[in-house]
Amino acid sequence: MGALADGRAAIDKGAWASAYALLSAADAETPLEPEDLDRLARAADLIGRDTDSIAAWTRAHAGFLERGDRLRAAASAFWLAFGLVSDPSSHAQAAGWLARSRRLLDEANVSCVEQGWHVCASALQCAQAGKLEDARVTYEEAAAIGDRFGCADLVALARHGQGRCLLDLGRRSEGLALLDEVMIAVTGGEIAPRVAGIVYCSVISACQDLFDLRRAHEWTTALHRWCTANPDVVPFRSSCLVHRSEVMQLSGAWPDALEEARRACEHLRAHERPADPGASYYQLAELLRLRGEFEQAEEAYRLASQAGRKPQPGLALLRFAQGHDEAADAAIRLALRETRGRRSRVHLLAAAVDIALARRDLAAARAAVVELAALARDLDAPFPAAKSAHAQGAVALSEGQAEPALASLDSARSTWQELDVPYELARVRMLIGLAYRQLGDEDGAQLEFDAAQETFERLGAAPDAARAAALAGAAERASSGGLTGREIEVLRLIATGATNRAIAGKLNISEKTVARHLSNIFTKLDLPSRSAATAYAYEHKLV
């Protein structure tokens, strides 16, 4: 009885891996009773051993039936269905277990919390069938049953389902308020790990669908803390790493984002049936593409596709970066025909604009801009609004309308600055530089190109940095000795007597970057010292 007692104690402590090992050892000596098989099934489920979890719950179900305990048998049937429903190859089995659960509850004919779990499953089926209002009402019924029997797990799962339905019905403020309330219970440790993990991932996914970056960042940070505090819990760890990588990428921490994406891919091996394995590979591919590591990116996109994740718009943008414009255009057009999700279409349409403009297909670019603007209005969030303004500015610029382009691009720049998304900010600054150049303001253009180049270099976006450098060097001015716009800024500050540290603070760059600019200035102008540089600046009226 030592292993069995220790296994039960490990369950109470949340030591799921130890509980699984101990209960499995006890079962090997003497077949476990249904209650302990249920414990074994929960432990196996949380450490990612899906096959063992299904086998244990199946045996528990049979054991409860043999005792005549229809309610516990129905509960086992429900969790079997719940574990199978996310696997497309097991939908019929999931439906069968749900039907059995319903029959057993009807035969028991008593009011019980198990009815609430079944109602919750019925609500999920309604939602999957697109019957959102029916699903919302059914989730509300499940939450009421959970309240009646004091089951916090059921209440959280059901109210989370209500919130998701409200979002899909266009009732955003109500839906988000309900999800925030549920997350208070989840982050407060009031909810069991299986339900907590489901709610975490679902809520973060909803925030990303709405482009609510603040909430996505907040709940992703909370999910990371939760995963750290529950090291044995496997099924949600890959999702946690992917979400963290996406947040890090947006905030400009690309090396950390790349490490998290690679860890997410490695973590897939720990779970027999990960919920979305393609997401890990796609996120890794995106970072590799942006860094210019095209061969590795192509392999990661291939693995994402094999795992069931359509590799667009990333793969089309990879072909575009490789100079295969026709292939990129064909891929993005097909993806747009096949994709209906609003979040996915925002990214696809933004990519379609870039690809169409490169091919000088202004008609296609304009059509994509119109749809993107409509989506941005519908989503009513800063991120898609900035994407739309960026695309509108790019098209106007291609048509030679620099002033209207600047209005749109400045709007995008302000939003990217507020959201603190450095890569997108650098991209829009390159376009602003081109607009300044069209309007004859070469100084302004150089400053924008230099700022974009520095950001790209800091991020590790090698292809973009090369493009920015090419634009910056396209019109070096003889009057300034071939200095770039940023080098002129540094020279002007040197002439005021500013130190390298002061210049770095003024221009929001590192002292190392200041030193590099200073070296370039001395080399280009053939100057021996800072005092000589100061004299040059005054002589050429740069100050």
Image (cartoon, grey):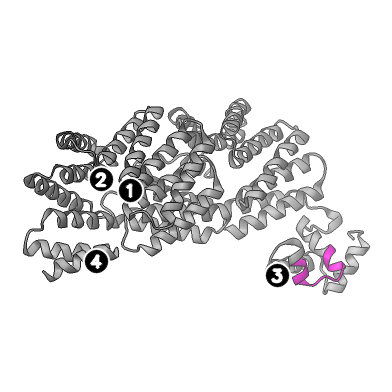
Could you tell me which secondary element the residue under label 3 belongs to?
helix
- What kind of secondary structure does the magenta stretch mostly adopt? helix
Query: Which of the two discs, 4 and 3, labels the residue nearer the N terminus?
Result: 4
Q: Residue at x 76, y 53 (%)?
A: 447
Question: How far apart in space, not on screen, are marks 2 and 4 (Cα)?
Answer: 22 Å
Distance from the alpha carbon under mark 1 to that under mark 2: 24 Å
**Residue in front for this viewpoint, 522 or 436:** 436
* Foreground tag (2 vs 4): 4
Q: Which is nearer the eye, 419 or 1?
A: 1
Residue at the disc numbered 4: 10
Reply above or below: 92 against 296. Answer: above
Checking the image for residue 83, the label placed there is: 2
**Residue denoted by label 3:** 511
Q: Is residue 475 above or below residue 519?
A: above
Identify which residue, 2 or 542, lies in the foreground: 2
* Type of amino acid at the residue the image marks with label 4: Ala
Q: Earlier in the sequence, mark 1 or mark 3?
A: 1
Whether 139 is drawn above or below 50: the answer is: above
Amino acid type of the residue that numbered disc 3 sits on in the rendered structure:
Glu
N-terminal of the pair, mark 4 or mark 1, is: 4
Q: Secondary structure at mark 4?
A: helix
Residue on which the image places disc 1: 150
Q: Secondary structure at mark 2?
A: helix
Q: Is residue 292 something one can see in this rendering? A: no
Upstream in the sequence, badge 1 or badge 2? 2
Quadrant where the N terminus is found in the figure? bottom left
Few, some or many C-alpha atoms within 10 Å of disc 1 (few <14, some 14-19, many ≥20)? few
Magenta segment includes 327 = no
Residue 364: where, in percent of width, then height?
58, 27
